[in-house]
Every structure is written in structure tokens, then in C-alpha cells.
Amino acid sequence: MREKKLEVLAPAGSFESLRAAVNAGADAVYMGGSRFGARAYAQNPEGENLLAAIDYAHLHGVRLYLTVNTLLKTRELEQELYDYLLPCYEHGLDAVLVQDMGVLKAVREWFPDLPVHASTQMTLNGVGGVKVLKELGAERAVLSRELSLNEIAVISRETGMELETFVHGALCYCYSGQCLFSSILGGRSGNRGRCAQPCRLAYSAVDEKGKNLTGEQTLLSPKDICALDLIPEIAKAGVYSLKIEGRMKRPEYTAGVVRIYRKYVDQYLQYGEENYKVAEADRRELLLLFNRDGFSEGYYRQHNGKNMMALKNAEASEQEKRAYEELIVRIHKEYVETEQKVRINGCLSACEGKPMSLVLTAEKHPEISVRVEGEVPQKAQNRPMEEAQFAKQLRKTGNTSFEWEHLEIHLEGNLFVPVGALNNLRREALEAIRKALLESFFRPIPVELPEEGNTTIKEKAWKKTVLHVSVETEEQLESVLSYVQEDGKESGMEAVYLEAETLEDHLEQDIRQIHAEGMKAYVMLPVVFREKTRERYEKRLNFWKELDTDGYVIRNLEEYTFLKENDLLKGMITDHNVYTFNKRSREYWRDAGTVWQTNPLELNARELKEISAADSIQLIYGRYPMMVTAGCIHKTLNRCKGVPEQWSLKDRYRKVFPVKNYCRDCYNVIYNSQPLYLLDRKEELEALHAGAYRLMFTTENGRETSRILCSCLNGQPEKGEFTRGHFKRGVE
């Protein structure tokens, strides 16, 4: 970890925002280029402009991190990413943020000395996930926004990893990296940087009996986070980098927020926690810059609640609008129009008969020094030049990036130097120090370049496709077993997955029943595996070790580590949200010990064909989980009874999205309004050569489960509304 105690990390959605962040005091910025970033609609620079941004940051002593925090398809990863990153790498890029496990592996292979930061898009909720990424060479973990101060402290203590957390700006309602809402509704995938933010729209809530609980409200729209008061506690928890959200916002917003966080980070570092206090004027300024129904402190000190949600959308008053405009004008003048200068020290030496020399060093980089020679001074015919005349010309730095901190002048003899000669010496010296400063960050091209198509995976030979079924309720399981007992022996049904979150108390008897029908039984671990969940599972470790399961279905890195550390890796299956968008990510999980990998839900048939193999599972029926949320609609409406129920959300088009609350670990899952149905796409499915198809039962009752089994397995078209998901269209 760095010796510096805290980093103020600012968003830079444009070059103008970069300049604003630098001027306001950011230690580092994160910026996307033209490709692969999680904010595809920001004014991201590309090509030479991106390199110029890196240079600008470095010249002013600021680090620049490039976002490649999306999921990449095989072609993009193998044919485009290296060429995209190489110029940035050579230019001294400080780090790259990644979401995709395949991208992480590739970057570590291609550029071993380029720091990698694991993006919050990796849904890092616990010690286990951070450990995995540290072992793979990541230098920093950007933790999920949903974690508490206590959870962060545990991760810091047990991993020693450099940590980054969000302290200001917009909060997603869904765990980052787990949201398919925008993707499924409009084809704009958050996992590809194109989120359309359907969470900011209004929905009405409907209870399990079909009763409308609310009119249309922004039930999925959290307030922005402002953790200014928590900086001492966040620092004590082990966080190094304080991240400000806002690459889509204007430069004045960036500058205004950075200025205030810079002020209070410095206050804390200089005077300590006991003297730390936030002025109300600064709080009001942050509210003026942007807020949604006020601020919350995020999840640092509470798990969820109504007070975190932006349920009101009040129009700003005329007084507030005027104050906002005045604030923007002031910030623009102070931080956007102006440019922070790089302070330099210099020494001019001049004497008769020898060329003048000017030595420059940068104030913040005294180890970098340049020496430039100029013309030979002439002997003055009349009145010799004085030091002030030399200094006057040398101090004219004009519109360059530099200004003088200290200038020494040593003259010997009665000298005369033409003004033009001094100007040339100054220009050459300033260009030389600029070049030296920037080149100190440059890297040589890696000696061994990767060959195109160098990723080879040993695929298992495809023989036939079997059927897997996942269930969440006893009622669903009874329907599956009844079907197999009556007339499903020839169906090819090989395995049943049991949702541990809802069936944990019945797992032993359920597994016995499944085995009695000649099928395998797998346990699906929770979608979210945070510290309390880990503690609960470790308390029952003997139960999990003695359970006669054929394996486990994992949904995150934390569960992989739990299984690995407790010798439970047998029969490991990755679910669809453990993303395998490309061959490298598939290879990682195969090496980690998977027996099956569930194909991701956002690839189309052609793209699936490129990665699908004999150990692939293709989902052919089920409701997509659109969101996994720490927020709870029951809590938001003050109706929490601590009892799992199935509610619904209704949108402006009257579409109904089922919502299940999982109380044991307190999270919600919002499902698509229509189930996926692909059974009538037989030829396209067969072309995938997947080893298994999966029916995923979530919200269905027993009767619906039986009906769907019959229609799917007997080749009868499913009645009612359904979706093809991304099987035909895919995502951009």
C-alpha cells in the first residue's frame, strides 16, 4: 500500500472535467476512453486526446486510471483490447479498472507492471472476493457501495488490499455488476457501459394479494450519497481512496465536489478526528451542486431504509435556482477557466565567453532536472544588463503549464544578451522540463507481444445435452419430482439445483429425494455472500461438509473462496452472473475447478456459440433476475415484517415485475415481467453444443411448475407472454 493516507479520486468524463478536477485538488482521476468503459455516453477522449489527458494529469502530479470496467466479448478481448491499451501503457497510465475476469488475466499477461484495480462492477462484497483478486495480481479493490464500515474494516484487516469506496454521488439501487434491468428492457446494458437508468422511473408496489400499496413513486431511486462527515471513520476502516461519482456530470460539479472533499481530507490528515467538523456552508454547497431529495450517508452505517430513497421530486425554488447559477459561475471562473500551474525552480548562469545555461527542476519532482545552453553573452558596450532584466524575460512563462517558484541568477562580468536569446533559452528549457517530466512516466513496449488468437482452451467433447432444473420452493421441487416419477424418465433430466436461501432447512431430505430418483442434487449458494452470511455458513461448516450434495452453484467470488478454503470445491457450477463473456474468463473458471459453467444472459446465439462448450449450461426457461438489491421495498414502505413474501412492481406500461425479499440475508431480487422461453429454438440451441439446458423456476407455484415442465419437455409451445431475452439481439 502507498504511504499516503488518503486519495481524493475524482471523475473525469471529459478533458474539461479533468482540468477542473486537477485545479480543485484531486489526487487522481478515473476516466474512460472511447471503448470498454462503464460510462459509454460520457465525453470520453480517444486516441491522441486520451494520451494528452494522461500527460496533463502527470504534468500536474495527478494519477489517471483508465476504466475498462465492462464485460468484453472474445473478439473484443483478443483482437482489440491490446492495441487499445498499448499506447496508454507506454504513456505511463497509472492503472486500469476492470470488471471482466478474462480482461484481468489478459492485462496481467500483456502488461505485468501495469497496476490493475478491480472495479465495483465485480460485486466485491467480502474477504473472499478480494483475496482471489489479490492473488491474481490486482493492486486495489473497489468495494460494493452496499458494505458497512465494519465489513470494510474486516476486508482491510484480513486481506491487506488497497481499498477504494464511494463517498459522494449517485447510488445504484442494484449491486453493481448484477443489474440487467436496462439491458433487458431496452437493450442498453449496464455491464457494457450503456445503462439507461430505469431505476429512476416511477413504479407502483403491489403486495402478494394483488393489492396496490402505492401510487407511482420512484421506489428504486436512492438519494445521492454524501459521506463527508464519515471521512475519519472511513479512513479508520482501512480505505485509501475516496471515490467521487459523476463522469456524466458537468465540470463545475466535479470541481465543486472535489474542492470540498480536498478541504476536509486535508483537515482530517492535519488535525485528526477529534478536531474534524464539517461547515454547514459546505454542506449547502454540495446540496446546491446536485442532490436527489437530499443526501444520505449511503450504506456505511445502515443496511437499508426509507430515509435512503429519493421518493420526492420537488421542483427547486427560484431562490435555489439563482443560488445554483451563481455557484456554477463562480466555480467555472475559479476552476474551469483557469489552469493550475506547475511550479518550477531554476538557476541561470552567464559569463563572458561561455554559453548561458539554465537549469530547471520541478518543485514536486526535484529528482527531475534539465540543463539547457543558450547563446554566448556579449561584453556590454555601454551599460551592462542587470539581474532584473534577465529575470524579467525568464519569468515570462505566459500560457505554458509552468510558473516560477524560485529563480536564481548568477552573472559574471559586464554582460549583454539579446532579449530574443533569453526568450529562446526560456522556451527551450520549459519544453525540456515538460518533456522530462512526462517521459519519467513512460514505459518501454513489452518485449514479447501477444500473438493473435493465442488463447487455446481444452474443450471437452460434446456428446449429448442433458437437462438441469433449479427450484426455490418445496412446492416447485414436488412438481419436479412428480413429473420424473410419472413420465419424465426419458426427459434427460440429470440434476436439480436447490436454493439454499429458501430451502436450507430442508436440504438433507430434499437431496435424498432427488438421489432416490437417480438424479444429482446441487445446492445454490446465496446471490449475496457478505460477512454475516460467511459467519453463518462457517458456524454450520460441519453441516455443509457432511451434506450429501453433488456440488454447489456459486454466484460470486466470495462463495468460491468459501468452498476452496473448506475443501468443498467438488462439483462446482458457476451461475449466469459469474460472467464468462469470453474464452479467457471461461478458462479461468475451468482452471478453478468448475464442472459446469452457466452461460451469461446477455450474449446472442452467435456469440454464445463462440464460447459454449460441453461443460456449458444454457438457460432455456426462467425469469431473468433484473436486480439484486440491498434495498428492500418492504422497508421503503415501512411494511417490513421480516417474512419472505412475493410482491410486484408495476411500471408505466402496466408491466408487472415480481419482487422476492430474502430476509435471512436481507436483500431483494426483482425479476423480469416475462419468463425466457427458448424450447422452440431447437436448431439454434443444438448449434451451441451445450452440455446441459436449464429450467429456472423462481416465482412459479406448483401448478405452474408442472405445466411448464410438461410443455417444455413434451415439445408443446408455452402459452402466455414470454421473452427471447438476448438470444436473438444480444447487447452492443
Image (tube, rainbow, N blue to C red):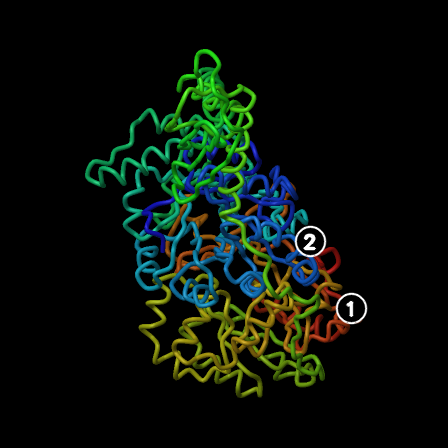
Q: Position of residue 473 (x, y in %)?
A: 50, 69
Left or right of 630, for residue 237: left
Number of disc labels = 2
Residue 214 appears in the figure: no
In front: label 2 or label 1:
2
Residue 452 appears in the figure: yes
- The residue furthest right is 683
Residue type (three-letter) at the residue carrying disc 1: Glu
Q: Is residue 638 above or below residue 509?
A: above
Q: Nearer the viewer, residue 637 or 445?
A: 445
Q: Nearer the viewer, residue 665 or 178?
A: 178
Q: Quadrant of residue 462?
A: bottom right
Give the mark nearer the N terminus: 2 vs 1: 1
Q: On the image, numbered disc 2 is attached to which residue?
A: 731
Q: Position of residue 139 (x, y in %)?
A: 44, 58
Q: Is residue 102 above or below residue 469?
A: above
Q: Residues within 10 Å of mark 1 (few under 14, many from 20)?
A: some
Residue type (three-letter) at the residue carrying disc 2: Val
